[in-house]
Amino acid sequence: MSSRQPRSRTFLSGELRLHYLEWGSPKATPMILLHHMNAHAHAWDRFAESMSDSYRLLALDLRGHGDSQWAPDGKYSGE
C-alpha cells in the first residue's frame, strides 16, 4: 500500500472504540492531527498526502465523529 493512502485503524480508550487514519512510514517522525468541532479524520487527507513522505501522520476521529464511537451517555458538554 502506498504511504499516500491512509490505513484505517482503531483502538480502545476506556470503553470507547476510537478510529484514526495513518499515513507514512511507522519509522518516521509522528505528527498527530486533530480535526475541529464539526469534522472528522478525513479533513486531513490532502495535507497528510503531501506530508506522508516525511512524517508518520495520525489523524484521530474524536469521540462521536467520523468512525469513532459515541459516548454511551451522550454527554458532550464537559459537565
Image: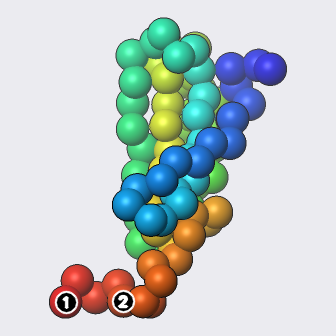
Amino acid type at image mark 1? Glu
Furthest residue in direction top, as rendered: 27
Pick the residue in front: 67 or 52: 67
Task: Locate residue 24: give its quadrant.
Answer: top right
- Give yes or no for contact between labels 2 and 1 (Cβ–Cβ under 8 Å): yes
Left or right placement of residue 7 versus residue 78 in this view: right
Q: Residue at x 19, y 89 (%)?
A: 79
Badge 2 is on which residue?
75
Left or right placement of residue 22 versus residue 12 in this view: right
Badge 1 is on which residue?
79
For the question of whether residue 45 can be seen, the reply is yes
Furthest residue in direction front, as rendered: 15
Amino acid type at image mark 2? Lys
Pick the residue in front: 70 or 31: 70
Q: Is residue 49 above or below residue 3?
A: below
Secondary-structure class at tag 2: loop
